Image (tube, helix red, strand yellow):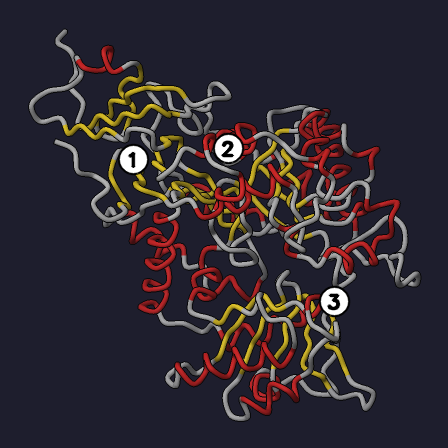
Amino acid sequence: MSQQLADVIISSNAVFTGLSDQPEPASIAIKDNKILAIGSEEEIRSYSGERTKVYPFHDQLIMPGFHDFHLHMMDGAVSMNGVNLFSARSEEEALEMIRTFAEARPEDSWIIGNSWDAGYWDTQQLPNRYSLDRILPDRPALMFHAEGHYVWVNTKALEIANINRDTEDPSYGMISKDKNGEPDGLLYEKAMDTVFRHAYNFTKEQKRELFANFLNHAASLGITAVHDLFAIEALEMLNDYDVFKEFEEKGELTARIHLWPALNGNLEHVKQLRETYQSDKLRVSGLKQFIDGVITARTAYLLEPYADQPDTRGEASFPPETFKKWVVEADKEGFSIRFHAIGDGAIRLALDAYEEAQKTNGKRDSRHSVEHVEVIHPDDIPRFKELGVTASMQPDHFAMSERGVYTDRIGSEREKYVFPIKTLQEAGAKLAFGTDFPIDVLNPLLQIYRAVTRIDSSGEAVWHPHERITLAEALKAYTAGPAYGSFREQELGTLEAGKLADIVVLEKNLFDIPTEDIPDTKVQVTIVDGKVVFEHTKALTGN
């Protein structure tokens, strides 16, 4: 049989295959959508024919494509058109940013913003609707808190959503009210839903445009696969699987998309979705649900009360028995399950539910996961390995919360077990990293940087230096970890012959530069399924 010839050969002195802990010189032969062979320049030369394109990348790093294990595509795409308030250091500064943004977009019916955090403001006081009314009296405004579990809205938004002093709180969440009993413009958890239904009422055409923007943005950051996780019922109207399918049929899906609809007891519906969407590029991978909220809003579910508010320990979004029943039923149907669990009470409940499924249905390779794992009880750390559960984490999250506020909420005892990435890994947990975009920016290298430095929100201090992991470990948690977490380790996650050609080339070798330069390192080329989906200006000038 004659030697197969490659369509493309790429080579570099720094290729991180993910099979060892250091990059090494190598050439990679690609044919169609697969890696044909990988080896020395000599070994790969025989794969080169007259039509083969050859691209040498010298000292630039070639590695498996980034695989974001946790994000929200469509609300992320909406936020790309919104105002980002993360850098504001006072309410006035945030308002000024919103005003400037709104003036520049007179055609937008809703003014949407994200990532404000009063923990960073000079007063540390939560805002209210009246300040937004001053700058936006006539257009509805919706501003997401940095953690995405509560919003700040103006009077116009409340009117459109028909929220007033008589509106009752939902089953999980709260309409914040002032001393006169009037809504003050802060909506927590499920109380946000009615506002979303109005703000996110997009046409098919708008959804196509949003999705295309998301795909372009992801490709420019070297992201070749993503996991789109159920967020909240009200955002489901954004998630138009038909639009995703349309892109796939036109050959315009430039990232592999894994969909995780809601775990809510409605198994017939999701079984149908799983049958419908099951391709290489677009598939339903399992189910997702929230057990709790977030620490700063005190909606995370703790085993013991909050240190700064002893009358509450947060609560679970549904009764524990409901979660267990749903998990046992879905596990029996072969679904992988993922729970948002931030507080130690929520993490324990997630693990208990997975254990119950194992006892009821028998042990199987289920690859369930816990999302975020922020404040964990030490007794629960070894259970990840025992139950085969993935720790799905977003390392930059610990730098997004103002550290002092975070510690005040949980107290110093629980603070010892915050974002315990290294501890979990050493206890045998499988790690998988992501961004939780749009809660955080989509750049994978920011997460890598936090995982290897543990530099906190101040930009100087280090939060638990003993929880740092190595650069190789962090890169594997962003490539091989998610591939394993989605049962795709035979096709994705490392650079090996026979695997799908999802590859990224970075402008610099991350192993050779100061760690503080990691987040700003640019992507040169992104290859998905053997095709170039992003190229930095003239990166591909081979022969």
Callout 3 secondary element: loop
**Which disc, if any, is residue 475?**
2
Q: Residue at x 55, y 33 (%)?
A: 474
The quadrant in which residue 64 appears is top left
- Local crowd size for mark 2, using a 10 Å CA cut-off: few (<14), some (14–19), many (≥20): many
Image-based side of 219 in relation to 186, left or right: left
Callout 1 secondary element: loop
| Image position, residue 225 (x, y; %) | 42, 41
Residue placed under numbered mark 1 in the picture: 529
* Distance of label 1 from label 2 (alpha carbons): 20 Å
* Distance of label 3 from label 1 (alpha carbons): 44 Å
**Which disc, if any, is residue 105?**
none
Is there CB contact under 8 Å for labels 1 and 2? Answer: no
| Image position, residue 247 (x, y; %) | 29, 52
First reached walking from the N terminus: tag 2 or tag 3: 3
In depth, the one of 391 and 204 nearer the eye is 391
Q: Nearer the viewer, mark 3 or mark 1?
A: 1
Say what amino acid the circle numbered 3 marks.
Answer: Ser
Q: Nearer the viewer, mark 1 or mark 2?
A: 2
| Image position, residue 79 (x, y; %) | 47, 65
Q: Residue at x 69, y 71 (%)?
A: 121
Say what amino acid the circle numbered 1 marks.
Answer: Asp
Residue placed under numbered mark 3 in the picture: 171
Q: Residue at x 43, y 85 (%)?
A: 103
Quarter in which the N terminus is drawn: top left
The image shows residue 80, relative to residue 465, as above or below, that is below
* Distance of label 2 from label 3 (alpha carbons): 40 Å
